[in-house]
C-alpha cells in the first residue's frame, strides 16, 4: 500500500488572488527580506486583508534555514496565534513555514524530531498555505522539510505527511523576475525531482505521469526561461513543471543526486539546485549500469534515442549534460570551486551525510560507501562513472 | 532452515550482522538496542520479542525474550508476521512499511532517522538468515 498526497492547488497567472477567498481571522506570513523587497509580502497581506484577515510576518528565513530560525519563527507564531500560516518564497521559506507551523501546533517537539512515523495531530490551531516565488523546489506540494543543523554541517530531511499544505498557490507572476542563475538552479532542482521521482524504487502509477510531464516541460522551457526571462509562457510552464515534479517525487521519492546534493550543501553550502543538477548525470550513469530500464523509458518519452534501454539512459545523460551546458552550469565540483584537497578532507562527513539520506536507499541502485566516495570523486573532475 | 523469531534465529541474525562489513561501516558511530516484536496472531498466541543490542557496528547480544520485561530497549519496532516476512523477503521496504504504519516504531525518532544506511544493512542481514516461517 501507499498514499498519494496533494494540497488543493490554485495555479496560473493571477492565482494569487485566491487568497481573497481565505476564511479565517489571522494569518502569519513566513518569508525573507528578498521576497519582501520584491513587494510580494505586501501583496499577499493586501489580499489577506481583503479577505478580512489580519496578518503579521516573519522575514528572517535564511537560505538553508537552521533549526534556530525555525524555533524563533515558532515562538513568533505562538505569540501571534494565527489560524493560517502562509509560506511565501523559495524552498527555504516554504520548508521553514512547514516546520514553524508544526512547532506552533506541537510546542513539545524539537524541529529535528518532526518525522513521518508518528502522528502529529496538526490542524488544531492553524492550516497552511504555500506560495512559491521560484520554480523548482516543489516544496509547495511536498511534505518533506529540509532544515540545516549548522552545528553538525548537515541538512536534515524531516517532515510528516500531516504537514503537507492545505492550499498551494502557484502563480507564475511571482517567479517571472528571477535572475538567470536562480532560474537555472531552481529549474534543475525540478528536473532532478522529475527524473529521480520516476526512477526511484518507490515510484508508482500515480507519480509516474507527473514526473514524465514535468521532465518534458523542463527540457522544453527551462532554456527559454533562462535565456529570456520575459517569456511568459516559459515562466508559466516552468512554474507548473516544478509543482508537477514536486507532486511526482513527493509521492514517490528522490534519489542519490539528492543525497549527494544535500551532503554537499551541508558541508560546502553549494546551492541546492546547482548541486543536485550537477550530480544527476553521474548518479544516472551509476544506476543505469545495472538498472537502465526506467531511464530508457524517460528517454523514449522525451523523444531521445532509446532503442535499447542502456542506450536510452546514455541519451538521457547526454541530454542532461547538454542542458547543463546551455544553462552555463558547472559540470564538475572543481568548476563549482571546490578544490580536491578540501573534498577529500571532508569526505567522511560527506559520505556519512549522503549514506543516511532516505533518498540513498530508494535509488534504483544502492551505493556502498566505497562507491559513494568514487561518485564524489568522479563528480569532482568529470570522469565517466565506469563501476 | 531456522524458525523465525526463535532464539536460534536471533543468534543467526547476530552472526550475520557481525559478519557484515557494510553494516559495520554504516553503523560505526551508532548505538541502541531494539525489541523487534512479532504481533500475536494465529501462529503466535503471544507476541514474540527478539532483542538485539547494536553497538558501533557490531551486535553485542541477541536473543528471543520469553519474558519481555528482562530488557527495556530504547527502540521497539512491531508488526504482524506477514509484514516481517515481506521485509525479510525484500518485498516490503521497511521504511515504506513504517511510513504506511504497517510497522510501529517507538523510540528516539531523531536517532533512527539519522541511521538510514545502517537500517538498510540490518535488513540485508536478515535476508541472509535461512528463515522458515510458519505456514
Image: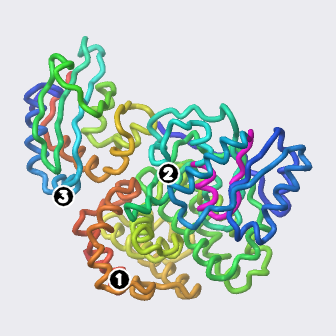
Which range is magenta? Answer: A82-99
Chain that bears disc 1: A
In this picture the colour scheme is rainbow
Q: Are marks 2 and 3 on the same chain?
A: no
Disc 3 designates what residue? B25
Quadrant into which the C terminus of chain A falls? bottom left
Disc 1 designates what residue? A380
Chain that bears disc 3: B
Residue A312 shows in the view: no
Residue A96 shows in the view: yes
Q: Position of residue A305 (x, y in %)?
A: 49, 78
Q: Quadrant of residue A106?
A: top right
Side of A148 relative to A209 (left or right): left
Disc 2 designates what residue? A252
Side of B134 relative to A271 (left or right): left
Given this view, does label 2 or label 3 mark the residue nearer the observer? 3
Given this view, does label 2 or label 1 mark the residue nearer the observer? 1
Whole-angstrom CA distance, mark 2 to mark 3, is 28 Å
Whole-angstrom CA distance, mark 2 to mark 1, is 29 Å
**Residue closest to the far right:** A50
Q: In this orientation, which residue lies closer to the viewer: A31 or A179?
A: A31
At a point 39% along the width and 87% down the height, the residue shown is A334
Q: Would residue A88 be counted in the magenta stretch?
A: yes
Q: Would residue A22 be counted in the magenta stretch?
A: no
Q: Position of residue A32 (x, y in %)?
A: 68, 64
Amino acid at each position: 500500500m501507499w498514499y498519494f498526497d496533494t494540497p488543493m492547488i490554485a495555479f496560473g497567472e493571477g492565482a494569487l488572488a485566491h487568497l481573497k477567498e481565505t476564511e479565517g481571522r489571522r494569518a502569519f506570513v513566513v518569508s525573507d527580506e528578498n521576497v519582501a523587497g520584491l513587494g510580494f509580502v505586501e501583496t499577499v497581506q493586501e489580499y489577506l486583508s481583503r479577505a478580512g484577515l489580519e496578518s503579521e510576518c516573519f522575514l528572517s528565513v535564511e537560505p538553508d534555514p537552521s533549526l534556530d530560525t525555525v524555533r524563533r519563527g515558532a515562538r513568533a507564531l505562538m505569540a501571534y496565534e494565527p489560524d493560517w500560516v502562509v509560506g511565501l518564497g523559495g524552498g527555504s521559506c516554504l520548508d521553514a513555514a512547514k516546520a514553524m507551523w508544526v512547532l506552533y501546533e506541537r510546542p513539545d517537539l524539537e524541529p529535528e524530531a518532526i518525522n513521518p512515523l508518528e502522528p502529529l495531530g496538526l490542524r488544531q490551531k492553524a492550516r497552511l498555505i504555500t506560495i512559491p516565488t521560484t520554480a523548482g523546489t516543489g516544496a509547495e506540494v511536498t511534505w518533506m522539510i529540509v532544515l540545516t543543523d549548522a552545528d553538525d554541517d548537515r541538512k536534515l530531511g524531516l517532515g510528516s505527511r500531516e504537514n503537507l499544505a492545505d492550499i498551494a498557490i502557484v502563480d507564475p507572476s511571482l517567479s517571472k523576475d528571477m535572475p538567470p542563475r536562480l532560474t537555472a538552479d531552481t529549474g534543475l532542482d525540478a528536473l532532478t525531482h522529475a527524473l529521480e521521482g520516476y526512477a526511484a524504487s518507490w515510484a508508482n502509477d500515480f507519480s509516474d505521469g507527473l514526473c514524465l510531464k514535468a521532465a518534458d516541460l523542463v527540457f522544453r522551457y527551462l532554456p527559454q526561461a533562462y535565456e529570456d526571462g520575459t517569456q511568459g509562457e516559459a515562466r508559466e510552464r516552468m512554474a507548473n513543471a516544478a509543482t508537477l515534479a514536486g507532486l511526482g517525487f513527493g509521492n514517490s521519492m528522490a534519489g542519490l543526486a539528492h543525497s549527494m546534493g544535500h551532503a554537499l550543501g551541508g558541508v560546502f553550502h553549494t546551492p541546492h539546485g546547482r548541486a543536485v543538477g550537477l550530480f544527476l548525470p553521474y548518479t544516472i550513469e551509476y544506476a543505469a549500469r545495472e538498472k537502465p530500464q526506467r531511464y530508457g523509458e524517460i528517454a523514449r518519452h522525451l523523444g531521445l534515442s532509446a532503442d535499447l534501454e542502456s542506450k536510452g539512459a546514455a541519451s538521457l545523460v547526454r541530454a542532461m549534460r547538454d542542458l547543463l551546458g546551455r544553462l552555463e552550469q558547472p559540470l564538475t565540483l572543481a568548476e563549482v570551486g571546490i578544490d580536491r584537497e578540501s573534498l577529500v578532507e571532508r569526505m567522511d562527513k560527506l559520505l556519512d551525510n549522503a549514506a543516511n539520506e532516505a533518498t540513498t536507499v530508494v535509488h534504483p541502485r544502492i551505493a556502498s560507501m566505497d562507491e559513494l566516495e568514487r561518485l564524489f570523486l568522479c563528480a569532482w573532475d568529470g570522469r565517466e562513472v565506469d563501476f | 532452515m531456522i524458525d523465525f523469531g526463535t532464539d536460534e534465529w536471533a543468534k543467526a541474525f547476530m552472526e550475520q550482522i557481525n559478519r557484515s562489513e557494510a553494516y559495520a561501516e554504516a553503523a560505526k558511530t551508532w548505538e541502541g538496542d531494539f525489541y523487534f516484536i512479532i504481533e500475536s496472531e494465529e501462529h503466535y498466541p503471544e507476541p514474540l520479542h527478539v532483542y538485539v543490542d547494536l553497538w558501533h557496528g557490531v551486535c553485542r547480544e541477541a536473543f528471543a525474550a520469553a519474558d519481555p520485561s528482562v530488557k527495556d530497549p530504547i527502540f521497539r519496532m512491531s508488526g504482524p508476521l506477514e509484514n516481517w516476512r515481506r521485509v525479510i523477503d525484500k518485498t516490503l521496504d521497511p521504511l515504506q512499511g513504517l511510513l504506511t504504519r504497517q510497522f510501529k516504531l517507538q523510540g528516539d525518532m531523531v536517532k533512527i532517522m539519522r541511521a538510514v544506511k545502517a537500517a538498510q544493512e540490518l535488513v540485508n542481514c536478515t535476508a541472509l538468515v535461512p528463515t522458515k516461517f510458519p505456514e
